[in-house]
Image: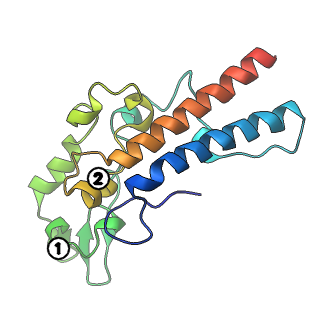
């Protein structure tokens, strides 16, 4: 299950929701630990399944989002976009089936977008686990793929804190 980040729609998370979401993540982590203690049927929550010792490979730690670099979206009209979430935003067309990739400048911008180039990520303790987040979320929240979505950052940090808490419990319990 994933909260819907973005901006402008009634179903998007807003600043006034964030504290409740963070509290719920923490309650879920405590339920996770309680379940372990009581030997209950295991359940998994994707965002708590973090290898805090190794994490993702170095390449994915620097830029996990593959938009414009590892994949692209193709519309029925044959237009290429860096990601399915950009389809319909004409400024993000990078090419077409008939012409190939033509917007090299935009492709290069996506290639260079990482935790090393995102100012907000440089000093963040969680950067090597979230890897700067989703470029589309950043764009739709701030208008810039280089500016991580603030609410995403808060949720990601809380998820990592919870994952660390669960791992600490498991290590101490052994």
Point out which mark residue 138 bears. 2
Rendering coords of residue 148 (x, y %): 29, 45
- Which colouring convention does the figure follow? rainbow
> Residue at the spot x=67%, y=20% of the render?
168
Rendering coords of residue 98 (x, y %): 18, 77
Residue 74 is left or right of residue 162, and the answer is left
Rendering coords of residue 58 (x, y %): 40, 28
> Residue at the spot x=39%, y=41% of the render?
153
Image quarter in which the C terminus is found = top right
Q: Indicate the secondary structure of the residue bearing disc 1.
A: helix
Which residue is disc 1 drawn over? 90
Q: Quadrant of residue 92?
A: bottom left
> Residue at the spot x=25%, y=76% of the render?
88
Residue 99 is left or right of residue 30, and the answer is left
Residue 94 in sight from this viewpoint: no
Residue 6 in sight from this viewpoint: yes
């Amino acid at each position: 299950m994933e909260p819907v980040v973005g901006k402008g729609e009634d179903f998007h998370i807003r600043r006034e929701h964030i504290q409740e979401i963070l509290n719920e993540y923490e309650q879920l982590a405590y339920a996770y630990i309680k379940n372990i203690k009581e030997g209950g049927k295991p359940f998994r929550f994707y965002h708590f399944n973090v290898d805090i010792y190794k994490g993702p490979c170095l390449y994915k730690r620097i830029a996990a989002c593959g938009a414009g670099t590892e994949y692209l979206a193709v519309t029925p009209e044959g237009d290429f976009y860096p990601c399915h979430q950009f389809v319909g935003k004409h400024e993000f067309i990078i090419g077409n089936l008939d012409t190939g990739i033509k917007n090299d400048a935009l492709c290069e911008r996506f290639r260079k977008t990482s935790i090393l180039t995102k100012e907000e990520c440089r000093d963040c303790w969680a950067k090597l686990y979230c890897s700067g987040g989703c470029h589309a979320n950043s764009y739709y929240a701030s208008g810039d793929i280089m500016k991580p979505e603030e609410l995403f950052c808060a949720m990601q940090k809380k998820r990592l804190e919870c994952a660390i808490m669960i791992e600490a419990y498991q290590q101490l319990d052994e």
